[in-house]
Image (tube, helix red, strand yellow):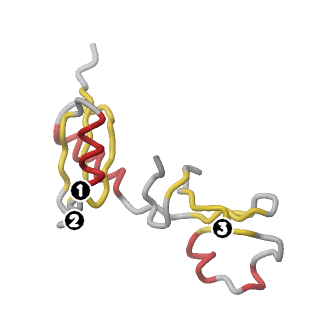
Amino acid sequence: MNDKNQWWGYKHTEGTYQAKRYFEPLDIQEANESPFCEIVVGPFMAANRDEAIEIIKTMSEPKEIHVRLGVPDYIVTKAEYDDADANDIPDNAYFIGYEDEEGNECNEDGVPLE
């Protein structure tokens, strides 16, 4: 028997983490539209609120962001890309987007793309 429920949560702009039981997509949609939610995550499975808070913290942690350049796949960390001078990047490279350490597309701040 699975004793876990669906949860979602967010990091508040003041730095606190909030865990909520997930019932419908509207919960997350409203949080994404709120100016007080810095990062919204979920839904995910957790046994209780404490476990949900830990999952939200983990999912909200900044990750090393990579920049994908087209050339045949030339990938560097965002820090390397930001620090690179023009000689470090192949002449035919062009910017494609950002991805996290696992290769998931994200924005410049590491927030996953929907």
Q: Given contact means CB atoms under 8 Å apart, are the residues at marks 3 and 1 in contact?
A: no
**Sequence-wise, which precedes: disc 3 or disc 1?**
1
Residue 112, given in percent of the width and then of the height, sits at 46, 52
- Given the image, on which type of amino acid does mark 3 rest? Val
* Residue in the image at 61% along x and 62% along y: 97
Per the model, the C-alpha gap separating discs 1 and 2 is: 10 Å
Between 65 and 40, the one lying in front of the other is: 40
* Residue in the image at 83% along x and 71% along y: 92
Residue 73, given in percent of the width and then of the height, sits at 76, 58
* Residue in the image at 17% along x and 59% along y: 16
Badge 3 element: strand
Give the mark count.
Answer: 3
Residue 25, given in percent of the width and then of the height, sits at 30, 35
Few, some or many residues within 10 Å of mark 2 (<14, 14–19, 20+): few
Residue position marked by numbered label 3 in the rendering: 76
Residue position marked by numbered label 2 in the rendering: 13
Residue 34 has which mark?
1
